[in-house]
Image (cartoon, helix red, strand yellow):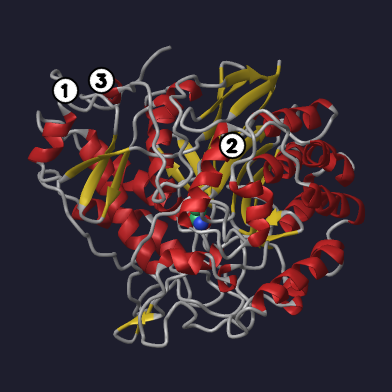
Amino acid sequence: MEIYNPFKLGLLLTLPLPFIAQVNWKSPESIGAKNTNVSSASGRAVVVTANPLASDAALSSLEQGGSAMDAVISAQAVLSVVEPQSSGLGGGSFLLYWDQKKKSLSALDGRESASAQIKENVWITSDGKKVPWLKATESLSAIGVPGTAALLWEGHRQFGRLPWEDNFKRSIQLAQEGFIPSPRLLKSITLAKKIGINHSPEFKSLYLPNGSLPPKNIPFRNKKLASTLSLLAKRGIHTFYHGEVANTLLTDLTLQQNKNKAVQTITSEDLANYKVQKRNPVCKKYRPWQICSFPPPSGGGVAVLQALGTYELLSKKNWFSKNITHWHLLAESLRFADADRSHWIGDPIDLPVPLKGLLENSYIKKRAKAIRASNTTLRPLPGKPKGSEFLDLASQPRTIDGGTTHLVVVDLDGNVASYTSSIETVFGSRHLSGGMVLNNQLTDFSFLSDVSGKPIANRIKPNKRPMSSMSPVIVFRHGRPVLAMGSPGGWLIPHYITNALIGALDLKLSPKEVVNQKLLSVRPNYTVLEKGGNWSNPKNNIHNKLKSLGHSIKYNRFSSGLAIIKWHKGSWHGAADPRREGKAASIK
Ligand code: GLU
């Protein structure tokens, strides 16, 4: 493969070594296995999901003449059974969908929404302190109105080709007859146990029967989920928000609430009023490509576009003296973008988001100017984009979380889906209803509403959707899609995506090489390099270069779950992140 390297010092010098992942509650979804094989596939149609059973179901939808949307529905339904720690009908999702015939890009927002009854101080204790994050995740108040089922329904209405019901066959079969639980699923159950499950007898009886993990070699069944999926398949969306599934959910929540009447949660009105929002994708030119991603309530898309924008300007400056590496520019670009997203982004239903201003070339230029070649800028301040003149906000403190999955599909007609779906942390709130794991997405809101009287954009309000970092991406060249990708990873998602886009576009890496790259991430005051990378190579010591530019460096394992497809020489190529258990599959 021809390598185009825009830098004097190349990324390739620090390409990957085998990855060994960790498990701890800060990156809850990591798998402890030494999984160094990359699953990849090429052809006219490709799917990549986080689990082989889901990829097979998606592929089989395509083989039956289904569209990319049908494949998304089949995959999501199966993931709710086999990867319940990451996503499912009890959660929310974002879909970016390219309709090849209409040549149009849609963004469907199925993010969880807060109850109309929610109190702004739900995460503040009576003595004025913040509720500890882990405690909050298990509260009934953390559960937002699930949006995934509504998104799948709306997506199917617009883009589906197979009968709705057909897309659920495989998931129902797997839930009923069982499947061999994956190592990652078992690890995630252990992790859920560590972070707390005593509040959920349903979780214990399903996932820890008799107090121990489900046996490794015996099919694991979830009969209640099979019934929920069957109801949704047969009766359509009405059952989920108004009918039997809704009633079971409300009864289960009331039962739990009886233990503590003071705890507020979602109501029948909240379910009945839930709507998928059609959003306008955010797009920006990066070199010759047009990169599109998801708008607020996600801050992820804006962050990716801003980071790439400043990075492109900086990388043209020819600063590549001995001590300046493009990793410095990447770190600074990410840090500056992060400062903006924790300040300006929230669901625009509440406070206006200066979206246009944040992505304008003149603003990106200003931000790039503030980045110093000779030294890192710790804790950069947010900028002042156009449209923010009357907004006097405070920034939100950040957390890192992980209960999410990403999948990409391109079908035989060239329709492309890039879909990220979440229940927030590992197994969400660990509350279950109808076999579904219920999310804890409302802990993605800022726990504080304001700082010294200045409101936080991501404060809690009735019916509002919490800010997300999920960043499904589709890249275009000459008006046609050439790449789609996304990842789980909470706050770090845009970091993973920006690394991956630079690899795929600038360095022309194949999807397989992209998912194998070692990654860089940032916090406000330090830089994180992925463990196991060749960062101290004597020929090009990135570690030392970054140090000499003032970076304080930490090494960490990352639990990205990149799923990527890329057009190259007349066919599509896909790969799944070896840090998780994904599979790429194709129609030749
Ligand atoms: N709740 C997070 C978000 O919406 C995603 C968590 C994850 O990626 O694991 O940004």
Q: Which mark is residue 479?
A: 2
Query: What residue would you read off at disc 3?
Result: 13
Which residue shows up at 90% across the image and 43% down it?
163
Where is residue 68 drawn, in percent x and y?
Answer: 73, 37
Q: Is residue 242 above or below residue 27?
A: below
Task: Quadrant for residue 45, please give it.
Answer: top right
Neighbor class of circle 3 (other Cα within 10 Å; few <14, some 14-19, many 20+) is some
Q: Nearer the viewer, residue 139 or 259?
A: 259
Amino acid of disc 2: Gly
Question: SS class of the residue under badge 1?
Answer: loop
Number of numbered discs: 3
User: Earlier along the polypeptide chain: callout 2 or callout 3?
Assistant: 3
Q: Nearer the viewer, mark 2 or mark 3?
A: 3
Residue appearing at x 40%, y 33% in the figure: 21
Instruction: Please say if the residues under marks 2 and 3 sit with CB atoms less than 8 Å apart.
Output: no
Q: Which residue is mark 1?
A: 540
N-terminal of the pair, mark 1 or mark 2, is 2
Image height of 213 relative to 61, above or below: below
Of badges 1 and 2, nearer the viewer stands 1
Q: Secondary structure at mark 2?
A: loop
Q: CA distance from mark 1 to mark 2?
A: 38 Å
Disc 2 packing (10 Å; few <14; some 14–19; many ≥20) = few
Are circles 1 and 3 on residues that touch, CB within 8 Å? yes
Tell whether 506 sits left or right of 585.
left
